[in-house]
Image (cartoon, rainbow, N blue to C red):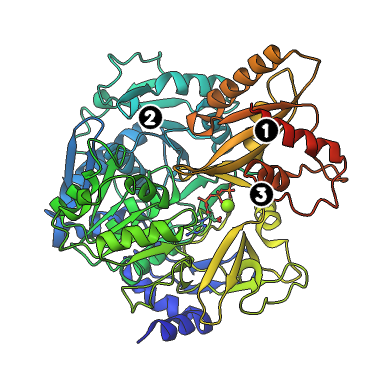
């Protein structure tokens, strides 16, 4: 059967379709009902079924593939390689789960995981899944402020962290960041579990709160921790989006639906069967890391490689040596990473034996044609653009080489994935946009299995954020799209503003709020401007509260940069800060970010009919000419 038939069946008879797909995972108790759609936009898949993500990812494979590699942790930063078979992974997860239990974590409790991209982070996630605790992984590159916000929202009983991360050879101790975050939290966890990598000198543990994992696991080495059988719709994890609206949204995911969607996508999209090898270069702190570094490959009985380090260190051939050594079949990365590699000799790639290699998937940001063309020429293999969101958990637009693959069309992430009833809606009319016309990409409910079930602790915000944009009850992706006559969809950008720095998404609002905390700043506008390497970098326009000399303005600008780095981390560092007397606004008081961005990128500022004070825009023009 072809893609078109599969797709049609997934949309026209979803219960039958998903009922069949559900057989791919282990159920302790089979579902009573495939779909309960009685309370839209909420929906429940596989109602009454009992299952467990850890059991499906680990225990289930022990008999057939206990001695096969499950996870490989490759660190260019420390020079260490750690390999775990399914049997060894099972042992490690049981030990970790026992330690979590000894610290008071149990079913339904939250555990925040603030870790570098190591196997211990994956083990911690699986250990949570085993005991039914809800993990919330916070990207290890985030600063104390981001961590504190997420802790206060998730209210964990335990925080799992490490002594340090390491990036480009620079050791970044985590404990000072954790201490700072917890001192700001209203709801700090009672215990902090520290995995010591031996990078930051002797561990300085604080009183009773901090626990050294190496000591805690003594006496637990043989632990057998029973699997908690969860109802399919109980939460498995929370993962926060980048927070364009100031307060990040905690995307909540279920158990059964997620497992079934991942099982389906592993073979149909990524063409990975049991025993094959997948290498996703994403960090565990992002949704790709959850779905295709950890849960997806393990549920499929495959081998997954976790990589810590830069794509160019020790040299730009490192990823391809890993591909050669482990016989990687499918790789998943980002356009930014490929743009970095593109600056180097393609021989770093072509000199390797890539005979087992079949596909490269790229996701997270628009894939420009020159980059796509370069890498597919070098590899001589299909390069597949993948479009999805933290909210969806698995691809929305893709090609499906595991099923049958339509030809790549450059600039388009392809067609709707199985189960996604996608439409492109004209914002003005609320009707379907004709082929070739721009509209908002939406999902017609019910959202398929695997997608978010709600925003943690805030059902109303789930409805307001995603389902309140049109007359009909539709999930808005908040992205513009065009669908061509052949069904290929093109993504045109967001309906709100986010800056994408080297694949890290930063809300303009979040940076503005951070800059505005400087006591001298009256108001700030942050935009992303094009950058050849990072995709985009933030720049700041700010007005000050009182009269100032140029030297004072320069001083304040430097302090603003520091505030942002301290609160949001180095990825958010503004490339330039311009101090001005006024910001361009609409009459209703909204910042005209689009016009600011156009001027900064030397483009036409567009429709200015809503501009309140033309003088403000003139001043921006002069400031840009003068330089920060
Ligand atoms: P927030 O929702 O807090 O603003 P975010 O949307 O930046 O965060 P993600 O969920 O990681 O965070 O990113 C999803 C978004 O990334 C999509 O909505 C889309 O804008 C963009 N995106 C992802 N993949 C692609 C792609 N292949 N082509 C173009 N854009 C993409
Ligand atoms: Mg988003």
Residue 583 visible from this viewpoint: no
The secondary element bearing badge 3 is classed as loop
Point out residue 427 in the picture as x, y percentages from the top left corner: 73, 67
Q: Residue at x 81, y 15 (%)?
A: 547
Q: Please identify the quarter of the rendering in which residue 150 is found.
A: top right
Nearest to N terminus: mark 3 or mark 1: 3
Q: Is residue 231 left or right of residue 354?
A: right
Is the C-beta of the residue carrying label 3 under 8 Å from the nearest atom of ligand 1?
Answer: no
Q: Residues within 10 Å of mark 2 (few under 14, many from 20)?
A: many
| The residue at label 1 has a CB less than 8 Å from ligand 1 | no
Q: Residues within 10 Å of mark 1 (few under 14, many from 20)?
A: few
Closer to the camera in the image, 259 or 96: 259
Tell me, yes or no, whether the two marked residues, 1 and 2, touch with CB atoms within 8 Å: no
Within 10 Å of disc 3 (Cα), the crowding (few <14, some 14-19, many 20+) is few
Label 1 SS? helix
Q: Which residue is mark 3?
A: 603
Tell which of 357 and 243 is nearer to you: 357
Residue plotted at (13% across, 57% down): 353
Q: Is residue 451 left or right of residue 198?
A: right
CA gap, disc 3 to disc 2?
A: 45 Å
Residue beneath disc 1: 625
Residue 409 visible somewhere in the drawing = yes
């Amino acid at each position: 059967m072809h893609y078109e038939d599969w797709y049609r069946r997934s949309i026209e008879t979803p219960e039958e379709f998903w009922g069949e797909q559900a057989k791919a995972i282990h159920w302790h108790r089979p579902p009573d009902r495939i779909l309960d759609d009685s309370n839209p936009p909420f929906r429940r898949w596989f109602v009454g079924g009992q299952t467990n993500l850890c059991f499906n990812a680990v225990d289930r494979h022990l008999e057939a593939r206990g001695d096969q590699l499950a996870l490989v942790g490759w660190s260019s930063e420390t020079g260490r390689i750690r390999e775990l078979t399914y049997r060894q992974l099972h042992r490690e997860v049981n030990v970790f789960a026992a330690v979590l239990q000894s610290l008071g974590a149990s079913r339904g409790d939250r555990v925040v995981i603030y870790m570098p991209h190591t196997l211990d982070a994956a083990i911690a996630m699986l250990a949570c899944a085993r005991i039914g605790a809800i993990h919330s992984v916070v990207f290890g590159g985030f600063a104390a402020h981001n961590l504190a916000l997420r802790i206060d929202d998730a209210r964990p009983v335990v925080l799992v962290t490490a002594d340090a991360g390491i990036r480009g050879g620079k050791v970044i101790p985590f404990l000072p960041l954790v201490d700072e975050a917890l001192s700001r939290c209203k709801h700090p966890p009672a215990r902090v579990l520290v995995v010591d990598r031996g990078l930051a000198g002797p561990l300085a543990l604080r009183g009773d709160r901090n626990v050294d994992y190496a000591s805690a696991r003594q006496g637990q080495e043989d632990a057998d921790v029973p699997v908690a059988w969860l109802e399919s719709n109980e939460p498995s994890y929370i993962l926060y989006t980048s927070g364009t609206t100031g307060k990040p949204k905690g995307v909540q995911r279920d158990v059964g639906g997620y497992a079934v969607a991942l099982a389906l996508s592993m073979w149909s999209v990524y063409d990975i069967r049991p025993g094959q090898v997948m290498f996703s270069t994403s960090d565990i702190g992002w949704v790709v890391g959850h779905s295709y570094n950890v849960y997806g490959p393990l549920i499929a009985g495959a081998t997954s490689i976790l990589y810590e380090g830069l794509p160019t260190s020790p040299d730009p051939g490192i990823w391809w040596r890993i591909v050669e050594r482990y016989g990687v079949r499918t790789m998943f990365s980002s356009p930014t990473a490929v743009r970095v590699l593109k600056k180097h000799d393609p021989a770093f790639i072509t000199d390797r034996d890539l005979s087992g290699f079949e596909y490269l998937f790229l996701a997270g940001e628009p894939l420009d044609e020159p980059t796509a063309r370069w890498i597919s020429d070098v590899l001589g293999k299909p390069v597949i653009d993948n479009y999805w969101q933290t909210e969806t958990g698995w691809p929305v637009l893709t090609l499906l080489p595991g099923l049958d693959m339509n030809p790549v069309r450059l600039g388009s992430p392809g067609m709707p994935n199985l189960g996604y009833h996608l439409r492109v809606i004209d914002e003005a009319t609320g009707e379907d946009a004709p082929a070739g016309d721009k509209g908002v990409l939406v999902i017609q409910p019910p959202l398929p299995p695997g997608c978010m079930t709600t925003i943690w602790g805030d059902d109303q915000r789930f409805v307001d954020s995603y389902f309140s944009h049109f007359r009909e009850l539709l999930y808005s992706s908040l992205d513009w799209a065009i669908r061509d006559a052949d069904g290929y969809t093109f993504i045109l950008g967001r309906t709100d503003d986010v800056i994408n720095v080297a694949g890290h998404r930063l809300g303009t609002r979040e940076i503005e709020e951070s800059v505005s905390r400087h006591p001298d700043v009256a108001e700030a506008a942050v935009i992303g401007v094009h950058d050849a390497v990072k995709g985009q970098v933030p720049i700041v326009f700010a007005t000050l509260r009182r009269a100032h000399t140029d030297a004072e303005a320069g001083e304040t600008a430097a302090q603003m940069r520091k505030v942002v780095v301290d609160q949001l981390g180095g990825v958010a560092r503004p490339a330039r800060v311009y101090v001005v007397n006024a910001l361009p606004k609409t009459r209703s008081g909204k910042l005209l970010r689009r016009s600011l961005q156009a001027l900064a990128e030397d483009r036409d500022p567009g429709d200015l009919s809503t501009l309140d004070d033309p003088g403000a825009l003139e001043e921006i023009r002069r400031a840009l000419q003068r330089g920060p």
